[in-house]
Image (cartoon, rainbow, N blue to C red):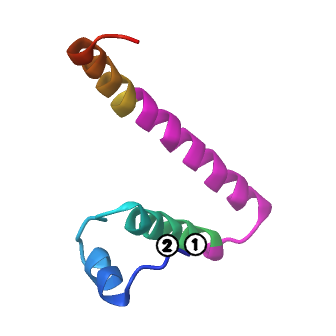
Amino acid sequence: MPYVKQEARRQIMHGRPPMDAGELNYVLTTIIHTYWYARPKYQTANDIVGALEGAKAEFQRRVLAPYEDTKIIENGDL
């Protein structure tokens, strides 16, 4: 579990977005732990890993690829 101060955890749980990688990790880990402990079995673990891989792929496709295309236009390719 990432080391995020208690006050920051309270703020995040009340709607403040994560401000750095540690806080983002905290939010994702909290959601995953909640999901896992509600139904701790192999299928749940498999579902979690699949959802994380899918979210990663979707983020790369929808956010990173267009960002990279913009930067290539701005700065030139390799």
Q: Where is residue 5 in the image (x, y as percent from the top left)?
A: 38, 85
List x then y, in percent, for residue 57.
Answer: 51, 34
Residue at x-position 63% and y-position 45% = 50
Question: Is 56 or 7 nearer to us in this picture?
Answer: 7
Q: Quadrant of residue 66?
A: top left
Residue 6: quadrant of the picture: bottom left
Give the residue displayed 38% in from the left and 24% down from the top: 65
Q: Give the numbered dot on residue 25.
A: none
Q: Mark 2 sits on what residue? A: 30
Disc 1: which residue: 33
Asked if the magenta segment contains residue 45, the reply would be yes
Identify which amino acid the numbered label 1 is placed on: His
Seen at 43% across and 67% down, the residue is 22
43 left or right, relative to 22: right
**Which residues fall within the magenta stretch?**
37-61
Dot 1: few (<14), some (14–19), or many (≥20) neighbours within 10 Å? Answer: few
